[in-house]
């Protein structure tokens, strides 16, 4: 396996929190995973995204009070926090995983989040679980 | 149910490190309900271990399996092929499950991945509380259905100590005073007179103090 | 009944009794006890010797109480059920009596969670009510808990604690009655700062006829500072220091706060002397034994 140079991101999102626009994914490879609601965010899916080679994982969910299913965004936030502790414990750096409240229309804010994630990755470094053959 | 919580991942890493092929074996009854060792937890732990060992450039094969109950022979059988393929079993069952596996597979390494905590209930989503210590001699009838042996920090049987204030125990403001609850329940039931009853020293012989316990049902022994 | 101890004798004569307190050292230094005894001797009828109070490991109450006996003062040996099972409890009571210890205060004990070694396993084999009963049964029947006839059974004057400030309040008098039934001869109460609540508790105890069956010694602790008042209210289990007491301490310049604390304490003792059903005062001057002489003298108890 070659060590990739272009940062790989996985972006989980509620259908109401994200819509792709041109040039949003400049300078990175992004795999998007659509969810009917933020409440479908699951610990194992987040971890598997890292196993699949993501350098960072983003979860985009509706504003807390804007969730159609009432608590979806709050549940997603708690699960993300839990996985962050696992990542910290195994030396993967929990900062690779983050969650943001967004709306689909706000493409500028989303582009901004992605760009800031890329900047952050310069400090955090690439996915450390992929630097070795296995 | 029996509650438990998964051991810290770094402790688990040290346990499985010497092996190249590990079966993470979940238990689908009690520990599943308290999010410590069901199918979901097996998957998360397997993923975390793979990520962790990849960083160390250590190759390890992890197999995942969850059976209904590790404490019953009937279900354990299902795990046999998986156990045969691996060098060690990381059991996410309670201590009884881990030992049942060790008994059944006498030549296999069985490691515990969960700290067994208590016999309790899920009081509200995500909050589990201890309710019973299995003392072997239930007195809940006189205490209005609230167990002072388990829920009073001092196991007091003749009323609350002087540290009970505003309904909470002296050890922790988040711990309700069991005696406060007993008195409330007995008031509701109109059985406050129970409180005046003198309770003699408890016979702990039926608890762990009498040594490991055994239950025998003659009619089921063939 | 022939008096079991000097404290018993004083109380049975209807005199207002005074007990003090001596916390054993965190170590084996007997001088600490001797120094405290020097400060208390002559001003109290007996001195409580605490048993690893607040679950901080100290010299044993039996050994410290034996030093008190040797110094010529009468100890009230405190015993908690936190650290001993019934075997050790009975054995220690027999040993204590053989060392000349004639008063015992039977307690549950503070939970070890707050102590110096919170990792310890606790015991709580029997509760304080059953501890009282055990000492009573040994004394009255001459037998241990198994019914075995003892060769010289300990004849102790038995004390128990009561906390009128703990909850549920309605249950506190029932609990007192239970301790009296179990065999308590005298009661020492938690420190009194909330006099209204104490008066209500003693009124109910009087109504139930309990104060005729047991001697009650009201607990007092002189406050040294406003900070101490606040600390006790917040941090000490089962303590109730009303706002007006804290305000009163706050209202005095720091250097005179100890004097104010003594004043409050004297007022409390004064009220206790007049209350029907109260037979004495238990002065817990924690690490401030020197103040006892002043309190006793100014309260006109000496």
Image (cartoon, coloured by chain):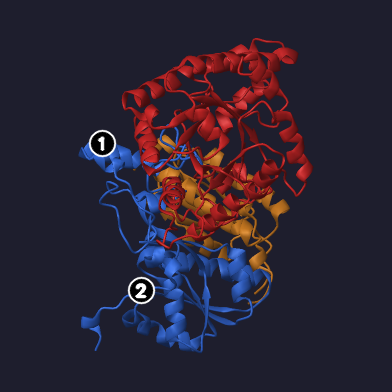
User: Which tint is chain C?
Assistant: red
Does B54 appear above or below C274?
below
Label 1 – label 2 distance at C-alpha: 41 Å
Q: Nearer the viewer, residue A132 or B110?
A: B110
As displayed, is residue C112 above or below residue B64?
Answer: above
> Badge 1 is on which residue?
B187
**Residue at x 44% of width, y 72% of height:** B211
C243 with respect to C127 (left or right):
right
Q: Chain letter of disc 1?
A: B
Q: Position of residue B99 (x, y in %)?
A: 45, 77
In the picture, one chain is blue; tell me its letter. B
Residue at x 52%, y 67% (from the top left corner): B45
> Which residue was labeled with disc 2?
B69
How many residues crowd around disc 1 within 10 Å: few (fewer than 14), some, or many (20 or more)? few
**Image position, residue A105 (x, y; %):** 46, 38
Circle nearer the viewer, 1 or 2: 1
What chain is colored orange? Answer: A
Q: Is residue C185 above or below residue A128?
A: above
Q: Who's the residue at 63% across and 22% down the image?
A: C222
Rendered-image quadrant of the N terminus of chain C:
top left
Furthest toward the front, the residue is C2
Q: Residue C297, labelled with which disc?
A: none
């Amino acid at each position: 396996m070659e060590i990739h140079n272009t940062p790989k991101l996985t972006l989980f999102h509620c259908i109401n929190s994200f819509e792709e626009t041109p040039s949003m994914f400049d300078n990175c490879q992004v795999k998007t995973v659509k969810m009917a609601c933020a409440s479908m965010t699951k610990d194992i899916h987040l971890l598997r995204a890292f196993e699949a080679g993501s350098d960072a994982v983003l979860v985009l969910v509706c504003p807390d009070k804007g969730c159609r299913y009432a608590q979806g965004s709050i549940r997603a936030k708690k699960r993300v926090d839990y996985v962050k502790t696992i990542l910290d414990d195994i030396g993967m750096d929990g900062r690779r995983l983050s969650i943001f409240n967004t709306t689909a229309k706000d493409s500028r804010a989303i582009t901004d989040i992605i760009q800031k994630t890329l900047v952050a990755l310069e400090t955090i470094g690439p996915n450390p679980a992929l630097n070795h053959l296995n | 149910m029996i509650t438990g919580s998964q051991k810290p991942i770094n402790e688990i890493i040290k346990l499985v490190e010497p092996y190249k092929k590990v079966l993470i074996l979940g238990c689908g009854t009690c520990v599943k309900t308290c999010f410590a060792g069901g199918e979901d937890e097996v998957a998360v732990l397997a993923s975390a271990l793979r990520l962790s060992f990849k960083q160390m450039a250590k190759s390890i094969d992890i197999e995942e399996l969850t059976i209904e109950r590790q404490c019953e022979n009937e279900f354990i059988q299902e795990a046999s092929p998986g156990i045969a393929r691996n060098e060690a079993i990381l059991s996410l069952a309670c201590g009884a499950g881990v030992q049942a596996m060790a008994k059944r597979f006498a030549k296999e390494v069985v490691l515990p991945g969960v700290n067994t905590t208590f016999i309790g209930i899920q009081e509200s989503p995500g909050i589990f509380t201890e309710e019973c210590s299995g003392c072997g001699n239930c007195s809940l009838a006189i205490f209005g259905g609230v167990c002072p042996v388990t829920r009073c920090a001092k196991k007091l049987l003749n009323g609350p100590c002087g540290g009970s204030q505003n309904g909470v125990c002296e050890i922790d403001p988040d711990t309700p005073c069991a005696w406060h609850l007993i008195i409330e329940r007995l008031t509701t039931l109109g059985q406050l007179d129970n409180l005046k009853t003198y309770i003699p020293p408890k016979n702990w012989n039926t608890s762990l103090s009498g040594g490991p316990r055994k239950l025998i049902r003659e009619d089921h022994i063939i | 009944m022939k008096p079991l101890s000097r404290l018993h004798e004083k109380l049975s004569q209807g005199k207002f009794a005074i007990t003090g307190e001596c916390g054993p050292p965190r170590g084996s230094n007997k001088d600490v006890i001797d120094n405290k005894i020097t400060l208390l001797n002559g001003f109290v009828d007996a001195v409580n010797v605490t048993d690893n109070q607040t679950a901080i490991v100290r010299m044993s109450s039996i050994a410290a109480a034996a030093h008190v006996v040797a110094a010529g003062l009468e100890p009230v040996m405190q015993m908690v059920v936190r650290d001993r099972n019934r075997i050790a409890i009975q054995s220690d009571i027999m040993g204590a009596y053989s060392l000349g210890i004639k008063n015992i205060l039977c307690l549950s004990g503070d939970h070890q969670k707050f102590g110096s070694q919170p990792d310890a396993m606790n015991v709580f084999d029997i509760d304080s009510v059953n501890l009282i009963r055990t000492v009573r049964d040994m004394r009255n029947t001459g037998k241990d808990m198994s019914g075995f006839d003892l060769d010289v059974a300990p004849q102790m004057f038995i004390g128990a604690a009561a906390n009128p400030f703990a909850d549920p309040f309605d249950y506190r008098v029932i609990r007192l009655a239970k301790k009296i039934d179990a065999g308590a001869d005298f009661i020492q109460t938690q420190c009194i700062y909330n006099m209204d609540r104490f008066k209500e508790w003693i009124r109910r105890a009087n109504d139930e006829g309990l104060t005729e069956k047991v001697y009650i010694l009201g607990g007092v602790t002189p406050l040294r500072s406003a900070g101490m008042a606040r600390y006790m209210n917040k941090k000490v289990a089962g303590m109730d220091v009303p706002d007006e007491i804290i305000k009163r301490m706050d209202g005095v310049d720091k250097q005179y706060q100890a004097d104010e604390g003594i004043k409050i304490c004297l007022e409390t003792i004064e009220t206790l002397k007049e209350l029907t059903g109260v037979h004495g005062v238990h002065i817990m001057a924690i690490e401030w034994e020197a103040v006892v002489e002043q309190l006793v003298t100014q309260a006109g108890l000496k």
